[in-house]
């Protein structure tokens, strides 16, 4: 019987090879060089293919044509998945609406709705529970005397965003007073028969910063293989996005800042102070993404900005909106970390079986 790779006894030379492999994989310079080499190999024909007889090459071409047909079927599969997402979004929405009502204090949950069963390791004896309930009651009464009872769940979405690395990097200190007014974030899918897309809707209560109560961001998607490179198809891809116009109150536009710069006159030698308005880092730049030219040709900076934008939009749609309360409490972040740790463990487990 054949033993699995991890169970085999390794000779000394194999053990040394494994140690060398691990050292190499931990060296960022070697990894970068290896990645560059692999990138250069993508799409290049192998010597083996070139050595095949002509009749065999013809059959391989037939197999590749079958693969193209598979890619088109896969595209149809993802279109149906999108239809299912739309169908179930309608089922989720009443729950998300109730979540929103609780957050913004439009609805006060009942005692039954507030009951939460703790994990087994967190469960306490009945007497201990009663003791803690009594203590909590006293503390609550004390707090009520000191200050007004907070409404809903204050700063819910701001806390969610600050708890997620991908979003917290976008949130600046001057964004926070506005994001405290954010009441809900929704995902809306394109209507049946329309091109595949989804929109993110950010609902704000009236505030002093802008007159909008709704800010939107729409992502256009495509689920079809590229005619020039059908084998690169790996599911729907975001093709572009459009934001919205924010109607800023005069003097409150935090996406712009005023700077003063001293300029020296070349002829006279006099110095004057020039005031300029320049872009400012802000979460709200999210609603003014760069345009994607029809030709698809973009400079590296624009391409990088759009790639990050697409990743953020997809993450909000897939993770943040469906599981917002768990990002608020931090539980979803722990799950994400576990996913990353598992991925690293699997990768590390593969390294020892590489042969040099």
Image: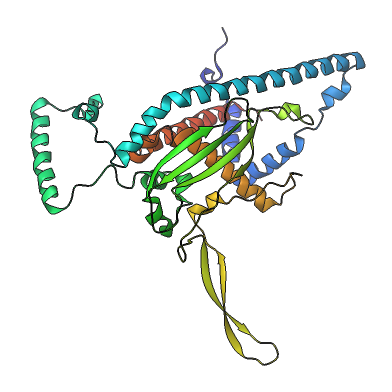
Nearest the eye: 332 or 200:
200
The image shows residue 329, relative to residue 129, as above or below, that is: below
Asked if residue 258 shows in the view, the reply is yes
Report the side of 141 relative to 308 (left or right).
left
The image shows residue 283, relative to residue 331, as above or below, that is: below
The image shows residue 282, relative to residue 38, as above or below, that is: below
The image shows residue 273, relative to residue 188, as above or below, that is: below
Q: Quadrant of the C terminus?
A: top right
Report the side of 353 relative to 296 (left or right).
left
As drawn, the residue found furthest toward the right would be 54
Q: Quadrant of the N terminus?
A: top right
Residue visible at 49% across and 33% down? 318
Residue 118 lies in quadrant: top left
Asked if residue 331 shows in the view, the reply is no
Tell me which colouring the rendered structure shows: rainbow
Nearest the eye: 62 or 186:
186
Residue 297: percent from left, percent from top: 75, 47
Residue visible at 78% across and 32% down? 43
As drawn, the residue found furthest toward the top would be 1
Residue 202 lies in quadrant: top left
Nearest the eye: 196 or 1:
196
Residue 282: percent from left, percent from top: 49, 56
Residue 110: percent from left, percent from top: 21, 30
Residue visible at 69% across and 87% down? 266
Residue 145: percent from left, percent from top: 11, 51
The number of discs equals 0
């Amino acid at each position: 019987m054949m033993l699995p790779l991890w169970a085999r006894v390794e000779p000394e030379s194999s053990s040394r090879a494994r140690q060398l492999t691990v050292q190499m994989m931990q060296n960022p310079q070697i990894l970068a060089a290896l990645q560059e080499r692999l990138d250069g190999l993508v799409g290049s024909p192998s010597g083996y293919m070139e050595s095949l007889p002509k009749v065999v090459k013809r059959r391989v071409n037939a197999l590749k044509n079958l693969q193209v047909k598979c890619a088109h079927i896969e595209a149809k599969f993802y279109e149906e998945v999108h239809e299912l997402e739309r169908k179930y979004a309608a089922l989720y929405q009443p729950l998300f609406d109730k979540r929103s009502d609780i957050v913004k204090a439009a609805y006060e949950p009942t005692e039954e709705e507030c009951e939460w069963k703790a994990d087994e390791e967190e469960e306490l004896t009945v007497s201990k529970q009663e003791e803690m309930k009594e203590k909590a009651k006293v503390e609550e009464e004390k707090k009520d005397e000191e200050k007004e009872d907070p409404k809903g769940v204050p700063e819910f979405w701001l806390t969610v965003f600050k708890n997620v690395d991908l979003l917290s990097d976008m949130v600046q200190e001057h964004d926070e007073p506005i994001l405290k007014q954010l009441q809900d974030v929704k995902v809306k899918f394109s209507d049946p028969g329309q091109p595949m897309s989804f929109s993110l809707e950010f609902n704000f209560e009236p505030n002093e910063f802008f007159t909008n109560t709704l800010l939107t961001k729409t992502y256009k998607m495509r689920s079809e293989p590229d005619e020039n490179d059908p084998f690169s198809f790996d599911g729907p891809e975001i093709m572009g996005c459009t934001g919205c116009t924010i109607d800023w109150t005069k003097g409150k536009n935090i996406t712009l800042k005023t700077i003063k710069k001293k300029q020296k006159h070349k002829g006279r030698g006099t110095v004057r102070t020039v005031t300029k308005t320049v872009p400012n880092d802000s979460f709200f730049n999210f609603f003014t993404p760069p345009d994607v030219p029809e030709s698809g040709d973009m400079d590296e900076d624009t391409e990088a900005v759009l790639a990050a934008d697409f990743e953020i939009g997809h993450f909000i749609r897939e993770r943040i909106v469906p599981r917002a309360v768990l990002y608020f409490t931090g539980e979803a972040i722990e799950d994400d970390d576990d996913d990353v740790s598992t991925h690293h463990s699997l990768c590390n487990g593969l390294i020892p079986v590489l042969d040099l």
